[in-house]
Image (cartoon, grey):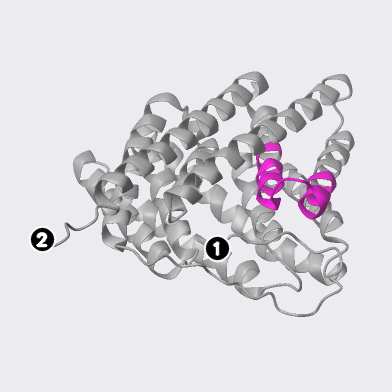
Amino acid sequence: MYVAPRPGRDDDPHFALRLGLLCVICFAAIQWIQPVVPALVVTLPIAILAGQRKRFDPMLGLVAPLLFIVIIWAMTLIVSLTQPTPVLMIAIAFWIFFAGFWVIRRTGSPIGMLIIMAAALMSIMGLKNPAMLFYFRDGFTQGALLSIIAVPLLYWLIPPASQMAHSREVELIQDRHGIGSLNRAFVLLLLCFWLYAVMPASDMILAIGAIFVLVFPTRGQAASEAVQRTLATLYGTGAALLILLILSWNAHFAMLLGLVALAGVLFGWKMMEGRHPSMVYQYGLSVCIAMVAIALSSQSPAYASIMRILLTGAGAISAAMLIGVLDSLLLNRKAPEPA
């Protein structure tokens, strides 16, 4: 699975500014669109822009959101058709998980990640609250369309210093892809049952943090990713609670836009200069913005914060540990030496 390197100050000195302005655009768009689940609209554009390096990448900025729309609508159709037979829906979801993990382990393509995310979230919603299934589909579609418009516009208004295309070098693993994919599909299925049991439908977007850990191909990478996302969760939660505390004193929309812009700039700057890997601050910003959007729509910031910490910490680390156990038992068994 490809992980973007740290943004370079020489290549893109305005990276943090661009990220802060996108946060403003996302919350202004929420005010105009009035989505049922606002967090769905803000998370995808921020992830798309934060993943860019050097000049604007049309594959990531344009093709990936369009592809995500197609996958989300396809998964909505599959879930809605199989919803009367939950066993069939779960079986189909499992094999979709397997296909997504196989694509990641065999090619390193992020398409596998999009397939897994869409299949996991939509299948959980189909079991938990069928009415919310279509709200999630529409929210993800709105977020993808917003990213298609906003991200290229910001790169046109504030171009990076480097006009070189970023080279994405994917480190593939040479191992039994089928067994490794089955291990991760099984763990993800267990995680989906847990999320179905403990998470309310309105906060299901918080599940992405726990699910994302499983897309990394080796157990060492999964464990490292789990620790990094737990740390990022703490950073994002702290920033979100600070924003909500300030808004409790001065609840003006202009103040909200200023605070989320400041959060975007600070997290973007730490992506370039922070002592932790850039992914910690990138995911921390996603946590912060999603939690603010959820809290402002649900009026339950404390509950959302606690659920985010418990979900990402316990779910991600437990999933990484279980993957390690399964890989040790099934994937790394050495053949007996001939006598």
The residue wearing badge 1 is 2
Q: Amino acid at mark 2?
A: Ala
Q: Which residue reaches farthest bottom?
A: 164
Image spot of residue 58 (x, y percent): 65, 74
Which residue shows up at 69% across the image and 50% down it? 277
Q: Residues within 10 Å of mark 1 (few under 14, many from 20)?
A: some
In the rendered view, tell whether residue 1 sits above or below residue 189.
Answer: below
In the rendered view, tell whether residue 191 sits above or below residue 151.
Answer: above
In magenta, the rendered stretch is 265-288
The residue wearing badge 2 is 339
Image spot of residue 131 (x, y percent): 42, 37
In the rendered view, tell whether residue 41 sits above or below residue 107.
Answer: above
Q: Amino acid at mark 1?
A: Tyr
Q: Secondary structure at mark 1?
A: loop
Of mark 1 and mark 2, the one earlier in the sequence is 1
The quarter holding residue 149 reads bottom right
Query: 109 or 128: nearer the eye?
Result: 109
- Is 285 one of the magenta-colored residues? yes
